[in-house]
C-alpha cells in the first residue's frame, strides 16, 4: 500500500531536516572554534587564533588531541599549553615524552591534577620539527 505524503508529513520532514542541518553546522562551528573533544572553549591569544583542535580528548594516543594549523613547533607547544589550561585548569605540567607510531608523532604530557595524575596525548605530526 502506497502512502501519499501530506502537507503535515512534509512539514515534519522539513523540520527534522532543518534540525539535523542546524546540529551539524553547530558541531562544525564548535570544532572550528577551537573547542576540544572535552568541549571546553580554548581561548587563544590573537597570534594563535588560527589554531584548531580536532580529534579526541587526549586520554590515549588513539584519541589524541590533534593540533591543526600550527606553523612551527613553538607555536604548537603554545597551543598544547593553552588547551591544557582551558580543559584541565589548575593542572601542573610534568614531563613530556615524544612518541612515534607509524606515520604519526605524539607529545604525551604528564599532568598533576586535583583528581590525580593524568596523561594527555597530542598529535603533533602536522608541525613537529618545523622551526
Image (spheres, rainbow, N blue to C red):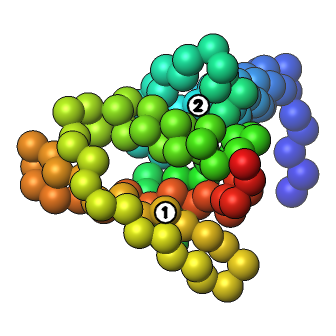
Q: Residue furthest bottom?
A: 102
For discs 2 and 1, the disc positioned in front in the rendered view: 1
Q: Position of residue 45 (x, y in %)?
A: 56, 17
Residue at the image position 62 percent from the left and 38 percent from the top:
75
Does 111 sit left or right of 65 as displayed? left
Disc 2/disc 1 C-alpha distance (Å):
19 Å
Residue 68's quadrant in the figure? top right
Does 34 sit above or below residue 49? below
At 10% from the left and 49% from the top, the residue drawn is 115
SS of the residue under disc 1: strand
Q: Circle 2 — which element?
A: loop
Quarter of the rendering containing residue 20: top right
> Which of the pair 113/26 is nearer the observer?
113
11 vs 99, left or right, is right
Q: Nearer the viewer, residue 84 or 73?
A: 73
Sequence-first disc among 2 and 1: 2
Q: Which mark is residue 34?
A: 2
Residue 83: assigned label: none
Q: Are marks 2 and 1 in contact (CB under 8 Å)?
A: no
Residue 15 x %, y % = 72, 23
Query: Up-down: is 113 above or below 16?
Result: below
Q: Callout 1: 10 Å neighbours few (<14), some, many (20+)?
A: many
Image quadrant containing the N terminus: bottom right
Among the 4 quarters of the image, the one containing residue 86: top left
Question: From the viewer's perspective, is 126 left or right of 97?
Answer: right
Residue furthest to the front in view is: 131
Judging depth in this view, the residue of 43 and 32 nearest the camera is 43
In the picture of the structure, the residue carrying the numbered disc 1 is 107
Amino acid at each position: 500500500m502506497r502512502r501519499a505524503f501530506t502537507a503535515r508529513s512534509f512539514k515534519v520532514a522539513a523540520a527534522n531536516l532543518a534540525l539535523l542541518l542546524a546540529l551539524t553546522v553547530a558541531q562544525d562551528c564548535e570544532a572550528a572554534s577551537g573547542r576540544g573533544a572535552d568541549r571546553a572553549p580554548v581561548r587563544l591569544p590573537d597570534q594563535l587564533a588560527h589554531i584548531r583542535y580536532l580529534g579526541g580528548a587526549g586520554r590515549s594516543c588513539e584519541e589524541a588531541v590533534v593540533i591543526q594549523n600550527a606553523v612551527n613547533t613553538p607555536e604548537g607547544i603554545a597551543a598544547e599549553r593553552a588547551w591544557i589550561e582551558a580543559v584541565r585548569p589548575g593542572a601542573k605540567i610534568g614531563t613530556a615524552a615524544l612518541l612515534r607510531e607509524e606515520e604519526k608523532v605524539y607529545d604525551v604530557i604528564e599532568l598533576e591534577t586535583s583528581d590525580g595524575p593524568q596523561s594527555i596525548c597530542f598529535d603533533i605530526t602536522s608541525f613537529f620539527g618545523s622551526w
